[in-house]
Amino acid sequence: MAFSHIPVLLDEVLQGLCLRPDGIYLDATFGRGGHSREILKRLGPKGCLYALDRDPEAVAAAKSIDDPRFCIVRSPFSKLASVCDELDISGKVDGLLMDIGVSSPQLDDASRGFSFDRDGPLDMRMDNSCGITAADIVNTWDSRDLSLIFKEYGEERFASKAAGAIVRERTQHPFETTLSLASFLERVIPGPSLHKHKATRIFQALRIAVNRELDELKQALDGASEVLSDGGRLCVISFHSLEDRIVKNYIKKASQGNAIPKGLPITFEEAEKIRLATATMEPVGGAVKASEEEVTRNVRSRSATLRVAKRLKRINKNAKCDSQTI
């Protein structure tokens, strides 16, 4: 079955990556390759693009790219540092793209169980060959744990009420399909359905929990400064505030360097030099949102946020830490 796929914030990503024809680039979340294919178009004969994805269907789709400059590796993007070590490109990557969250083909394929308006098994695994499913969580976790993820990952106002209702209902009717859960949540969550389906936040929370998405993102960001070359660009597209907050805080912290504990017998100037010497990233501009024109073409771009950062020059640990080194 063929699925349409429109890469989000494409022009902004290509600009943010600051592509060089002979550069080395990594698309850490291949999906269906919309961004990857456009990157390849702009690379010369000596350029190369590596891609990662943990979804076996995405990896299979990547096989259609018959290009010696391209290589796909089946792996979660949280493992990008170790993958780059194996590929011998750690510290050499000129641009790294992370397009976070569920892909359009995953949403559109009812059998993957991500969508509350398409009936299918309550699955939600990005790698559907292993791990727990959303049905496992809904039918086995206690009310307290369900309420916690609904509140933290879904920012659901009625988290406790929804969790309690699910636990009571599943004793008689376990939840096995997306529509059975979505229709139940529509009944038990108070208030009218206005701009969003009442199941929206609960489905988001379950998906994040199933795939450990926030932990995956944190690990991937930790590896970014390792794999990027000096001056290399990091582009991250997120689709909700939980992800964007993590990305924003990572860039802020990485640009500030290590804080120096108070009371050390050094001057402020010396402490500032040390702090700046440990900074690894520099923000490039602020948050970028899709234009009205793009949102009209692709409604899923409406919630997308792009942040860009640049890898700072590595400091020679053996060099004297003076103003010229910094």
Image (cartoon, helix red, strand yellow):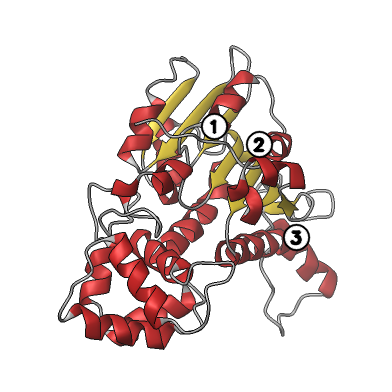
User: For this rendering, which residue is in front, 286 or 201?
Assistant: 201
Looking at the rendered structure, the number of numbered marks drawn on it comes to 3
Q: Position of residue 22 (x, y in %)?
A: 64, 20
Amino acid type shown at disc 3: Leu
Amino acid type shown at disc 2: Leu
* Circle nearer the N terminus (1, 2): 2
Q: Which mark is residue 49?
A: none
Q: Is residue 31 above or below residue 265?
A: above
- The residue labelled by disc 3 is 276
The Cα atoms of the two marked residues, 1 and 2, are separated by: 8 Å
Residue placed furthest toward the top: 45
- The residue labelled by disc 1 is 34
The Cα atoms of the two marked residues, 1 and 3, are separated by: 37 Å
Q: Position of residue 6 (x, y in %)?
A: 57, 36
Circle 2 — which element?
helix
Q: Are marks 1 and 2 in contact (CB under 8 Å)?
A: yes
Q: Position of residue 11 (x, y in %)?
A: 71, 35
> Residue, x 45% and y 39% (percent of image)?
31
Q: Is residue 236 visible?
A: no
Amino acid type shown at disc 1: Gly
Q: Is residue 155 visible?
A: yes
Is 189 displayed left or right of 234 in the figure?
A: left
- Asked which quadrant contains residue 278, the reply is bottom right
Disc 3: CA contacts within 10 A as few (<14), some (14-19) or many (>=20): some
Is 72 displayed left or right of 112 in the figure?
A: right
* Circle nearer the N terminus (3, 2): 2
Circle 3 — which element?
helix
